[in-house]
Amino acid sequence: MNPLHRQFPADFVWGVATSSFQIEGAAHEDGKGESIWDRFCKQPGAIADASNGDVACDHFHRLDSDLDLIASLGVNAYRFSIAWPRVQALGHGEFNPRGLDFYERLVDGLRQRGIQAWATLNHWDLPQGLQDRGGWNDRDTVHRFVDYARHVQARLGDRLHGITTHNEPWVIATLGHDQGNFAPGIKSRKIAAQVSHHLLLSHGLAMQSLRADGAKSQLGIVLNLSSTVPATAMPADIAAADLADSRSRRWYADPLFKGHYPADVLAELGADAPVVQAGDMAAIAQPMDYLGINYYTRSVIAASGEDWNAKGRGLPVSDMDWEIYPRGLTDLLVQMHRDYPALPPVYITENGGAFKDDALAQGRVQDDDRIAYLREHIAAVARAMQQGVPMAGYMVWSLMDNFEWASGYLKRFGIVHVDYATQARTPKASAEWYRQFLRDWRG
């Protein structure tokens, strides 16, 4: 049988991924404004360890050494995000040139090291100045995002290989505005539905504007998706799983690729359905140069509403208690290819596992569970390619341990260990495995 590394073409993109709020720190330097996550971290009980992103991994001050670290892995791509409040403190009004200076150094540093730069414009850290005016529930934020996207492209676009509009709009809408356990901490199904529409609309309008301005980068969006399956073969569980799939995967993919929302979810929302203006759906359904997919686990749905307790069933789980199910990635990719025949090139833009590996022993972290996770999920991508899915790249989440949102610093996803007291970086065994895998792939 072909070794795993030989199942990928020579032009395949291999990377690592991060996001601004999770690693940068320098929360109040060089004119950076407050984000909704800066504000959210101050709410009692919002973050598991009562921490914040003020310092995080101090990436802002350690840029050059971190770029050397990325290059040492042998990857050919780095996915990062731009902090909107660093570029425009309030999200409206004056732009901050010092904010973009940092990202210019980042992009130029990647270029000097022969690494593709993949920038995400919105990885959840909306400027608080816009939230104070209604945030993503306010249609004006759509237009402010387009202005911001154009400003970033004007400065950096000639050196960016890819531009992602939004990372995981489902998380922003559902966790941030329906369940309220992520920033900005709102609990309203109606607001969440409208937020989801405005995120998709801002994506489409930004794509139009960036292309009109002469985009040189590949343009797309990143969705967090899972394969959704019924808990049993009972008709009620099958129906519940179909609706859950519509609420999560199809609610975002159908507008992007078919120009409409799923009818079953619109019916369920009723009066809470988003206000959609004439022309909105056509704007959302812009052709994309690529689709990014973030995958961590499958979703198992029962009509009773009972959560799938993989750990309680003796199934393998990560430190997030998420079931480790690589087959679900293949199933998901094949399903996307079947449901949307005009699917553009697909990149796995995040995939990885949190494991309890924070102890350094003799300067090493022997994270065999993470190595197995990565190997098995990369094999799942290969199986999807063999079934005709247009796969173009894979990026490990995450480059380094970091601020894991509501979990604070309690969960570690990195292939590089971070000692938060000293900011020392130590590549784990998984980083060494990935480096060797890429060395073998290059031949």
Image (spheres, rainbow, N blue to C red):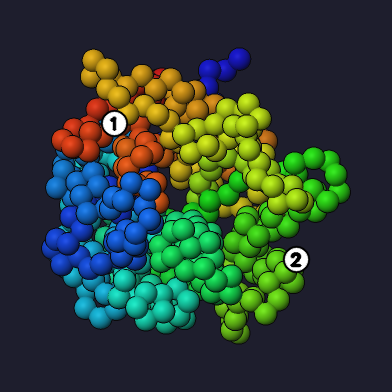
Q: Amino acid at mark 1?
A: His
In which quadrant of the rendered image does the C terminus lie?
A: top left
Q: Secondary structure at mark 2?
A: helix
Q: Is residue 225 above or below residue 113?
A: below
What residue is at 54 percent from the left and 26 percent from the top?
376
What residue is at 52 percent from the left and 68 percent from the top?
187
Looking at the image, tell me whether mark 2 or mark 1 is earlier in sequence order.
2
* Residue 364 place in picture, x, y as percent: 28, 19
What residue is at 43 percent from the left and 70 percent from the top?
206
Q: Which residue is mark 1?
A: 417
Q: Secondary structure at mark 1?
A: strand
Describe residue 326's horizontal placement relative to residue 205 as left or right: right
In front of the other: 143 or 133:
133
Q: Which mark is residue 264?
A: 2
* Residue 78 place in picture, x, y as percent: 34, 43
Q: Amino acid at mark 2?
A: Asp
